[in-house]
Amino acid sequence: MEERSDTKRWRALLLLHFRGTFRLRSWNRHHSVTVSLEEEGSQMRIKHYLEHWMQAFLNLDHRSQILLGCTIGLVLYGTLRTWDDTTTHFGSTDNRDGSVVSPARREKMSKNRHKGVDCRTYYDDLIGKTPLIRLNQLSEMLGCDILAKMESKNPGGTGKDRAAKYMLLEHLLSSANNNSNESIDESPIVEGTSGNTGISLAHLCRELGLDLHIVMPDDQSNEKKNRLEELGAHVKVVPNASISNAHHYVNAARTLAQTLEGTHIDQFENLANTNAHYSTTGPEIWKACEGHLDAFVMSAGTGGTISGVSQYLNEQKDQQRLQGEDIYASRRLEVILADPQGSSLFHRVKDGVCFTIEQRERKQKKHRYDTIVEGVGLDRVTANFQNAQIDFAERITDQEVVDTAHWLLKHEGLFVSSSSALNIAASIRVAKRIGPGNRIVTIICESGQRHYSRFYNPEYLSECGLQWPNESDSEED
Ligand SMILES: Cc1ncc(COP(=O)(O)O)c(C=O)c1O
């Protein structure tokens, strides 16, 4: 295991102590309870430290007490003069609610904390607050506003950064709260992932000096595996298998965590994943649209994004309806699942049965989901997906996904992953169904860069029986 430096240890503790924004939500199927573990934990720690310091102070001789008292007074005076007390959190230059601080205050804060350099401190501070862009060509063609939340702009290149941060924080907080000497749990972190969550965890674990073990299926692009290894993760690749098989990458990760006496993050069943999107992605979308949106379209990998965002948006929509102030108050918000071929979720939403024809015995051709789309599609209902509030599902074929990706490249100048092209293809269908004048929000999950060897490889597409679109095809569409 890699040697943890004192700086890393200190950072991990800072993360635990100063993260006033993090609220852990404990869910179950019937109701949800919000527990602010962070606040409770911080209060306990502050009390503990104050008692400890007071005792040390009383043990000093009289002269040292006066000297120390004056020094602390001067430091406090200096700090209070420059520190605007309320909404900042450690190392960040933005307010907790996502709004940006005034330039004057930003300058004060950054000078105060970073000795005159206006910078952000850690990887986790860069997560979230991603831009929402309008796909102009598509919007003009369809007569609807098609807006895309650029989750690819997160530091790890995907929205998985949000989930990874919340899941890791929940683990660190609960282990610190359970630990009488308040040290952080340094046992290895283990996760089963098709790649992206692993990459986000790898960045965060590097920052915190934690050891990371990743189990991934063999149907993912090499780009992801290489990046994980570059980030110092121990990667184990296992053959693709059904979830009922003990060697499925999620089950293999659980077993590995037991063997290493580590912590299995379990993004599929861990509800801190949904909470990340309920607390950040949903509010960011609502705020950017000023409450004016008609549909949200998203695929499901673990179900965390669609679940967290749909719950938040529906809650806001209900409030808007109660207040009934503007024309949007009377309009419904539709949440649509974009599902690739081979995934069972389409029928789960449409007919209430988790089934897909490609998964009939001996019918599978390529792999588990029989799709070229990476990172989304499920063969089961996960705890995160369970809570999603979905109205419709659109099933998109692999060929449509490929064509949409090339269209976006050619007409919007966007180079996106297969899961993002899937979301856009489903948004086009929704726009055609609900008609002009509506606003549809979807997600660009990731850029195309991790997908050269498969999705953007003509030979691989042809092996899968798919056509590489030629120039004139994308011209015509
Ligand atoms: C490539 C990719 N696809 C899909 C998703 C959505 O996955 P989930 O349902 O796990 O939130 C993500 C997450 O941002 C992703 O990075």
Image (cartoon, grey):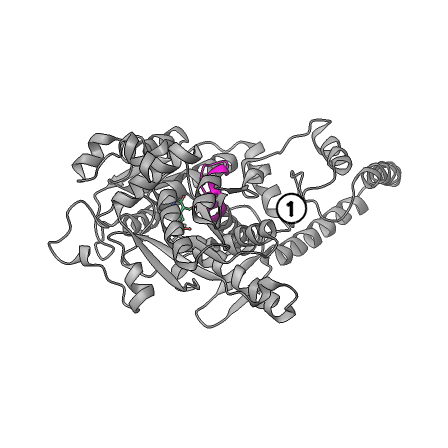
Judging by the rendered image, the residue that carries numbered circle 1 is: 18
Q: Callout 1: few (<14), some (14-19), or many (20+) C-alpha neighbours within 10 Å?
A: some
Kind of residue sitting beneath label 1: Phe
Residue at x-position 32% and y-position 37%: 476
- Give residue 432's quadrant in the image: bottom left
Q: Position of residue 454 (x, y in %)?
A: 27, 34
Classify residue 143 as left or right of residue 49. left
Q: Nearer the viewer, residue 368 or 228?
A: 368
Q: Quadrant of the N terminus?
A: top left
> Is 365 located above or below residue 120 in the figure?
below
* SS for dot 1: helix
- 285 versus 201 height, above or below: below
Write the residue at 61% across / 65% down: 320
- Count the marks: 1
| Residue 87 point in image, percent of width and height | 71, 48
- State the extent of the magenta-drawn residues as a range: 150-164
Quick check: 44 left or right of 363? right
Residue 45 visible somewhere in the drawing: yes
> Is residue 235 positioned above or below 288 on the image?
above
Where residue 124 appears, x then y in whole percent?
Answer: 55, 40
- Residue 129, how many percent across, how many down? 57, 43
